[in-house]
Image (spheres, rainbow, N blue to C red):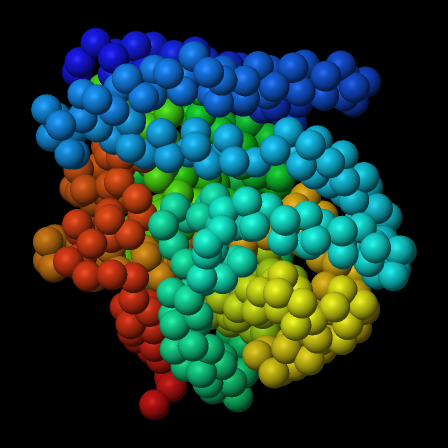
Amino acid sequence: MGKHIDRFRDLLEEVVDLNAAQAVLSWDQQVFMPPGGTPARAAQLATLRSLAHSKFTGSEMIDALEAARTELAELDPDSTGTRLVTEIGRLIEKQRKVPKEWVAEFARLTTLAHETWEKAKTEDDFASFAPELDRIFSLRRDYADFFKPYDHAYDPLLDDYEPGMKASQIDGLFERLRQEQVELVAAIAEVGPADDSALHQHFEVDRQWAFGEKVIKAFGYDFDRGRQDKSPHPFTTSFAIDDVRITTRFQEDFLSPALFATLHEAGHAMYEQGVSPDLGRTPLAEGTSLGIHESQSRLWENLVGRSLPFWTHFYPFLQKTFPTQLGEVDLETFHRAVNRVEPSLIRVEADEATYNLHIMLRFELEKALLVGDLTVNDLPAAWNDKFQEYLGIVPPNDSTGVLQDIHWSSGYIGYFPTYSLGNLIACQWWQVIRRAMVDLDSQIERGQFGELLGWLQENIYRHGKKFKPVELIERITGEGLSAGPYLEYLRGKFGKIYNLS
Ligand code: ZN
């Protein structure tokens, strides 16, 4: 790298350190901190955040960025130096377009709105949340306008989570998914959901923990560079490539939540652990987008962890772990149970086949609210109408309907589609992986994941944030985003499980 790029990288390393310090503090807050520590911790985090922001967008950084750009011509366009300047330079400039006053007002409003939302959800009182939600959408509209011209006001918001992606692309994908997924879910509903009573028994927490750990060790999550703890909401956090941690939570009366959350978070964590060491301590040393990240958590959780080959290997161990609960339950019944499909109210509890329908509904409502085609006061009714249309059920109240998610109260608008993109992208990779590894199923049946993890590291993980999501998808599949492989996967898998013709 040239000396100006080196200088730029040095400055970025300080920002990365400040961000890692924030991550440690917030991990501690969620895992160990006593409740009394909250106000002090909030102040500490705010100080670090503002220091990191000033360093990231300050004049010293801008000068270094501009100088670094003069050295680009001599470099390989895919080199770390080039990507630091182009990709991270783009982020710096994006942040600089947002006025300080907006940032302050947005922080103030979302802190308030979060509290209002929690109360409104508990009391099933949407009207009390409506004025602040209206203001959040209005601020988000202003935010989009900082990035004019755009095709759709949604685009600049989506770009924060999924760089380079546009609402029109999501429209196209969802158009296709909507019809076929609604049909599939309706066909499964006709057969009736699989019996999952085997999963609803008493399962001791320490044994759940031991089994989950055994599985993710076999996957290749590296405990020498990671650890697992308990927290109220499962998450993954990275302080460095060699220190990537996960958390999980347990339910004693239901086996699935902790088990699949552990596999899910391990998928996120293996992505972060797999970033190439030469990107270390740079902002490129992380997953490239939320959608690509979710493709990894879903791949390990669903494509591997809910598959028959996976359970062919692991079910005997699980039966040994819980002999009284599962000793008499056969493999096929268990596999059907972990793949139960049923339209349900709550997104985070939705199964593989219905999940995207929850996302589509939110995406469409967000877009309509953003451009003024829908008012916040009409939102609960619009939510229920779409729910009926897509899932065939209507929430009995707003608490389990329009008020269920934290995202809007936090100002995360444009975030939801990334969950669906994760499902789609995972299936696109999966088709390529199957061509590259013809004996994939039998490797999984033997509990061998080394070649699969190696493929993912080589093609995805090591690149970190060097390539935008769409670039990465094209490098690997030779084509763009597509809903085809996901629909094929769903039809194949659930057609078999539910004997659909
Ligand atoms: Zn996730």
Q: Is residue 139 visible?
A: yes
In the image, residue 230 sits, relative to residue 290, either above or below, namely above
Name the spot of residue 396 as percent of width and height, x first.
Answer: 79, 73
The one nearer the camera, 339 or 78, is: 78
For the point 34% across and 90% down, the residue is: 501
Name the spot of residue 453 as percent of width and height, x first.
Answer: 23, 40
For the point 17% across and 37% down, the residue is: 458
In the image, residue 478 sits, relative to residue 87, either above or below, namely below
The one nearer the camera, 44 or 422, is: 44
For the point 72% across and 21% down, the residue is: 42
The one nearer the camera, 315 or 280, is: 280
Q: Say whether residue 145 is left or right of residue 374.
A: left
Give the quadrant of the N terminus: top left
For the point 24% across and 47% down, the residue is: 472
Q: Is residue 358 visible?
A: no
Name the spot of residue 44 as percent of width and height, x first.
Answer: 67, 14
Q: Quadrant of residue 54?
A: top right
Q: Quadrant of residue 367?
A: bottom right
Q: Say whether residue 447 is left or right of residue 493.
A: left
Counting every numbered tag in the picture gives 0
